[in-house]
Image: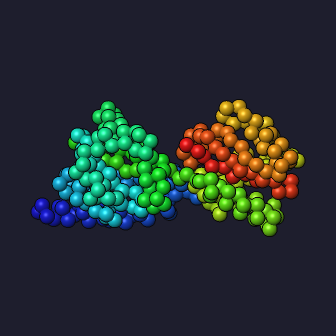
């Protein structure tokens, strides 16, 4: 009877994983931003892991959570479990590296004791989120990671995801491609492509915006489509800096340049420092900025 119950639980977990893996792509709205899709997937995976742990118990759940490529992993997403005393009991990304180790004092690349913060938050509220900087093994870069967690008995179950973050090199390459597209295809076709939030000119938190030099009108703003058709001349950043006016003056005088300011990141939904590269093409200024943390 016990073996039948265990088989049923594992089968349910595997079946749930298959359904889960297929659902995000088909259910996500076409306008969903990368971080929002990842956040939803991470929450769904964590919820399944919590339910499985509650039903199957730790002795059954932990070996399954520790299965690399198993039913509780999905691409970059995987279940990570820490006991209340700080000992890691599940880590499907590298089961042999950290499992069994007391990581209460483990710090991230910025020196933050994120495990301790998670344990304290779980003890106080039962669930929450922490952010930390960690090596993304997919692109081999240290990136900001967001971790959702929930307390289940003596264990804190969590699933983390990396917040997409474009680089200076990627921003430069995207601007060059946009300039080529405008010169080659003309404003009609190019601006349609630029304004497509799921198109080739939007990558993670990088996107192309276009402002007319003569009228100050937004012609492209894929992450804030309400700006398109409005006058940008007096637009200021979160610190009050007249960024468009400065950008237009530099574009008219030098043909392009760079500018630093603070702006809302559409992916993380936070105001962050931004460095934007811009270039004038005929009567338009094209810009691509990347966020710096």
Quadrant holding the C terminus: top right
Q: Is residue 4 visible?
A: yes
Which residue sits at x=66%, y=34%? 238
Residue 111 appears left or right of 263: left
Quadrant holding the N terminus: bottom left
Residue 161 appears left or right of 1: right
Which residue sits at x=86%, y=53%? 283
Give the farthest residue toward the left. 1
Which residue sits at x=20%, y=65%? 7
Give the farthest residue toward the bottom. 184
Across and down, in percent, residue 11 comes to 26, 65
Across and down, in percent, residue 240 comes to 71, 31
226 over 208 or under it: above or below: above
When asked about the image quadrant of residue 8, the answer is: bottom left
Which residue sits at x=31%, y=40%? 105
Q: Using the image as rendered, state which of residue 1 and residue 63 is in the foreground.
A: 63
Color theme of the render: rainbow
Residue 10 appears left or right of 203: left
Across and down, in percent, residue 99 comes to 25, 53
- Numbered label tally: 0
Q: Using the image as rendered, state which of residue 251 and residue 208 is in the foreground.
A: 251
Across and down, in percent, residue 278 comes to 75, 51
Residue 71 appears left or right of 4: right
Q: Is residue 33 visible?
A: no
């Amino acid at each position: 009877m016990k073996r039948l119950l265990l088989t049923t639980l594992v089968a349910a977990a595997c079946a749930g994983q298959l359904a889960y893996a297929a659902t995000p792509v088909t259910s996500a709205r076409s306008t969903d931003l990368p971080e929002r899709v990842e956040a939803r997937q991470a929450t769904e995976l964590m919820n399944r892991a919590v339910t499985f742990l509650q039903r199957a118990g730790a002795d059954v759940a932990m070996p399954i959570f520790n299965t690399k490529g198993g039913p509780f992993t999905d691409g970059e997403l995987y279940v990570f479990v820490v006991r209340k005393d700080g000992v890691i009991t599940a880590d499907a990304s590298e089961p042999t590296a950290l499992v069994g180790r007391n990581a209460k004092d483990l710090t991230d690349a910025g020196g933050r004791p994120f495990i301790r913060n998670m344990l304290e938050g779980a003890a106080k509220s039962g669930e929450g989120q922490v952010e930390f900087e960690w090596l993304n093994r997919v692109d081999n870069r240290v990136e900001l990671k967001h971790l959702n967690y929930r307390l289940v008995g003596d264990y804190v179950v969590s699933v983390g995801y990396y917040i997409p973050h474009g680089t200076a090199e990627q921003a430069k390459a995207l601007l060059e491609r946009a300039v080529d597209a405008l010169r080659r295809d003309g404003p009609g076709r190019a601006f349609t492509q630029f304004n497509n939030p799921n198109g080739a000119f939007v990558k993670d938190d990088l996107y192309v915006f276009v402002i007319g030099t003569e009228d100050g009108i937004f012609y492209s703003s894929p992450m804030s489509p309400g700006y398109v058709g409005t006058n940008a001349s007096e637009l200021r950043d979160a610190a009050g800096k007249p960024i468009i006016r400065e950008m237009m003056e530099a574009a008219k005088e030098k043909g392009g340049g760079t500018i630093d300011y603070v702006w809302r990141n559409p992916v993380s939904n936070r105001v962050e420092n931004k460095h934007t590269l811009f270039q004038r093409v005929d009567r338009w200024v094209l810009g691509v900025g990347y966020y710096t943390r």
